[in-house]
């Protein structure tokens, strides 16, 4: 085990992005496999009955795309909020807090929005349905993100060396990806139901809503 870990750390130092990409592929595949297994057990007889390999590939593709971005993002945070070389716990407190706050205030909400749009487009959903999915789930997922990642990232920035920070994120990411995969692939309220709602959704134009409402009235009269 020690030899395997030392080899992994060697490749991590020698080929950081490639090694992190391979790690991301394995973790993401395991996460989505776990999520789908839970869903098949939970919905036995009424929902998904077979494994969706395309769904796993979509999640893996997102992980591979984001690894080099997150790798460079951590470097940017380190340059923006450097900690003293011979740092004490107290001296590292403020830079770590700044990194965590800046990460969660900027990178987290933007990357989540892009993730939901990206996966939905790969699923073949229309832009209207994608917007409906985001309107329905984005706030709740983002709130869960803050509850999970604010303490994790604070510990990450405070205790973990720069070159290993993405590893902690990927390990916690195993559980987080299970949650993300489930939420992204859970059934949204159909767009037709949202159109027929008595409350006008914010993403539907007033003209479109009025026309649809008039059509519903005409059907009732008939």
Image (spheres, rainbow, N blue to C red):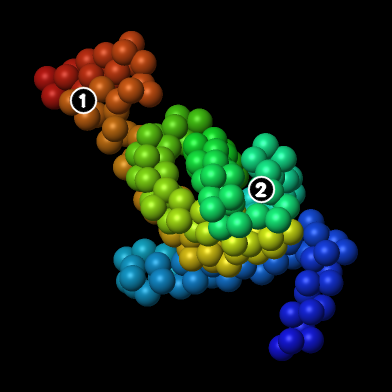
Question: The C terminus is located in which quarter?
Answer: top left
59 is higher (above) or lower (below) than 118: below
Near mark 1 (Cα within 10 A), the count class, few <14, some 14-19 or many ≥20, is: few
What residue is drawn where x is 36% and y is 64%? Answer: 47
Q: Nearer the viewer, residue 183 or 66?
A: 66
Give the number of the mark in front: 2 or 1.
2
Q: In this view, does 80 lie to the left or right of 56?
A: right
Query: Is residue 124 something that shows in the picture?
Result: no
- Percent across and percent down for residue 83 are 66, 48
- Percent across and percent down for residue 57 are 64, 58
Tag 1 or tag 2, which sits nearer the N-term?
Answer: 2
The secondary element bearing badge 1 is classed as: loop
Q: Is residue 179 left or right of residue 55?
A: left
The residue to which callout 1 is attached is: 199
Q: Where on the picture, by quarter, is residue 164?
A: bottom right
Q: How far apart are marks 2 and 1 (CA)?
A: 51 Å
Q: Nearer the viewer, residue 191 or 180?
A: 180
- Percent across and percent down for residue 97 are 52, 46
Q: Where on the picture, by quarter, is residue 197?
A: top left
Q: Is residue 36 left or right of residue 14?
A: left
What residue is drawn where x is 59% and y is 62%? Answer: 159
The residue to which callout 2 is attached is: 83
Question: The N terminus is located in which quarter?
Answer: bottom right
What residue is drawn where x is 70% and y is 56%? Answer: 86
């Amino acid at each position: 085990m020690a030899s395997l870990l030392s080899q992994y750390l060697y490749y991590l130092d020698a080929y950081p992005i490639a090694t992190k990409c391979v790690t991301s592929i394995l973790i993401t595949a395991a996460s989505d496999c776990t999520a789908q297994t839970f869903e098949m057990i939970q919905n036995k007889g009424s929902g998904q009955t077979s494994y969706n390999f395309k769904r796993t590939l979509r999640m893996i593709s997102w992980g591979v795309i984001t690894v080099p971005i997150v790798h460079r993002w951590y470097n940017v945070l380190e340059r923006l909020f450097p900690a003293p070389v011979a740092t004490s716990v107290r001296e590292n407190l403020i830079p770590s807090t700044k990194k965590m706050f800046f990460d969660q205030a900027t990178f987290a909400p933007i990357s989540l929005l892009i993730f939901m749009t990206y996966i939905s487009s790969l699923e073949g959903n229309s832009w209207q349905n994608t917007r409906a999915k985001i309107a329905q789930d984005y706030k709740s997922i983002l709130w869960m993100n803050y509850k999970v990642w604010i303490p994790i990232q604070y510990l990450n920035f405070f205790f973990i060396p720069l070159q290993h920070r993405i590893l902690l994120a990927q390990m916690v990411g195993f559980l987080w990806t299970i949650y993300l995969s489930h939420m992204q692939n859970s059934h949204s309220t159909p767009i037709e139901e949202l159109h027929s709602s008595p409350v006008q959704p914010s993403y539907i134009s007033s003209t479109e809503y009025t026309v649809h409402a008039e059509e519903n009235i005409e059907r009732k009269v008939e």
